[in-house]
Image (cartoon, helix red, strand yellow):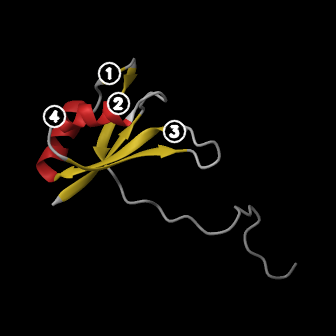
Amino acid sequence: MSKKIYVGNLSFQATEDELRGMFSEFGAIESLAMINDRETGRFRGFAFIEMEDSAANAAIKALNGKEVESRELTVNEARPREERPAGGGNSRGSRSSW
């Protein structure tokens, strides 16, 4: 069984190769997704890595709070994505009597 890991507070210059190197010492990486901004395409400073359970747990234990490039990493089990309402973010709510 595999576990998805959230890796946050990464340098904006971090590369996939660096992340693979950092996490592969704990086991095989099943998937790695570096999250980019939709509008600019720039890396947003966090990633998701999927690994086998025991490898993921070892990586979390070893890397959470570790300083990399003067930044303290946040490494933990990823939480399910929160559902956001569809639409353009209308702050007035949905009113049908306009």
**Furthest residue toward front:** 17
- Residue at image mark 4: 25
Which residue: 47% across, 45% down? 35
CA distance separating discs 3 and 1: 18 Å
Query: In what element is the residue under mark 1?
Result: strand
Amino acid at dot 1: Glu
CB atoms at circles 2 and 1 under 8 Å apart?
Answer: yes
Quadrant of the rendering where the C terminus is positioned:
bottom right
CA distance separating discs 2 and 1: 6 Å
CA distance separating discs 4 and 3: 24 Å
Which residue: 33% across, 33% down? 17
Query: In what element is the residue under mark 2?
Result: loop
Amino acid at dot 2: Leu
Query: Count of labels shown?
Result: 4
CA distance separating discs 2 and 4: 17 Å
Precedes in sequence: disc 1 or disc 4: 4
x, y percentage for residue 64?
Answer: 27, 33
Precedes in sequence: disc 2 or disc 4: 4
- Residue at image mark 1: 67
Q: Is residue 22 left or right of residue 36?
A: left
CA distance separating discs 3 and 2: 14 Å
